């Protein structure tokens, strides 16, 4: 009776290893999965965009650059360079929960931590509301959404 059970767990283990490596994409971790802005019209709201622009120039532009291209003066580091937030090939097309996770946890999250990311974890410096506001503004830096 023991052998079939062992076979099953062996196969399950095999699949865990094989399937794990097959799906190597970065997955938004549990507490952040599916989170969304405080209200439906939040991202388009002018007050939020104005507040977000203020936060961006105070806290983000120094690394990510005024226009989000990742070319800010403090971003010139040997480790991982600041992300180009305005490129349609990059984070601009990622879902909102991905943004909220990355802005909240920054370079403390894997695999970015091991790669030497200097992106700060903004949950320690900005309220949830402020994080959503800066996300609202930052997403307008993507050419398709800018003016
Ligand atoms: C000290 C420099 C620095 C500052 C300040 C900074 N970042 Fe970053 N940021 C980085 C670096 C370096 C990366 C690339 C490594 C990574 O993804 O962790 C990054 C990555 C990101 C990403 C993820 C990109 C992706 O493709 O996953 C987002 C989103 C982001 N930053 C937004 C912001 C916002 C919004 C602010 C301001 C509230 C900010 N950053 C401030 C250095 C910085």
Image (spheres, rainbow, N blue to C red):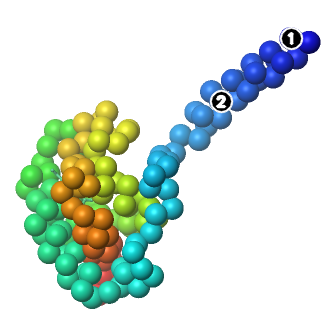
Please name the residue that numbered disc 1 is placed on: 2
Please determine whether, in this image, residue 119 is positioned above or below residue 5.
Answer: below
Asked whether, in this view, residue 25 is left or right of residue 122, the answer is right
Q: Position of residue 88 (x, y in %)?
A: 39, 67
The residue that appears at 21% across and 53% down in the rendered structure is 124
Q: Quadrant of residue 61?
A: bottom left
The residue that appears at 8% across and 56% down in the rendered structure is 73
Query: Image quadrant of ligand 1?
Result: bottom left
The residue at the far left in this view is: 73
Please determine whether, in this image, residue 78 is positioned above or below residue 121.
Answer: above
The 10 Å Cα crowd at callout 2, few under 14, some 14 to 19, many 20 or more, is: few
Asked whether, in this view, residue 11 is left or right of residue 70, the answer is right
Asked whether, in this view, residue 11 is left or right of residue 122, the answer is right
Q: Between residues 96 and 31, which one lies in front from this camera angle?
A: 31
Q: Position of residue 74 (x, y in %)?
A: 9, 52
Q: Are marks 1 and 2 in contact (CB under 8 Å)?
A: no
Please determine whether, in this image, residue 146 is positioned above or below residue 30.
Answer: below
Q: Between residues 31 and 87, which one lies in front from this camera angle?
A: 31
Q: The N terminus is located in which quarter? A: top right
Q: Position of residue 67 (x, y in %)?
A: 19, 70
Please name the residue that numbered disc 2 is placed on: 16
Real-space Cα separation, disc 1 to disc 2, in angstroms: 21 Å
Q: Nearer the viewer, mark 1 or mark 2?
A: 1
The residue that appears at 24% across and 69% down in the rendered structure is 130
């Amino acid at each position: 009776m023991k052998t079939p059970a062992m076979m099953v767990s062996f196969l399950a283990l095999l699949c865990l290893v094989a399937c794990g490596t097959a799906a190597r994409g970065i997955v938004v971790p549990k507490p952040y999965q599916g989170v969304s802005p405080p209200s439906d019209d939040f991202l388009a709201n002018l007050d939020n965009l104005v507040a977000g622009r203020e936060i961006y120039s105070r806290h983000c532009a120094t690394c990510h650059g005024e226009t989000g291209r990742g070319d800010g003066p403090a971003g010139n580091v040997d480790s991982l360079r600041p992300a180009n937030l305005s490129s349609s090939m990059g984070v601009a097309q990622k879902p909102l929960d991905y943004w909220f996770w990355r802005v909240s946890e920054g370079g403390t999250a894997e695999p970015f931590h091991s790669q030497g990311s200097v992106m700060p974890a903004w949950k320690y410096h900005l309220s949830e509301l402020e994080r959503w506001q800066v996300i609202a503004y930052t997403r307008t830096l993507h050419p398709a959404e800018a003016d």
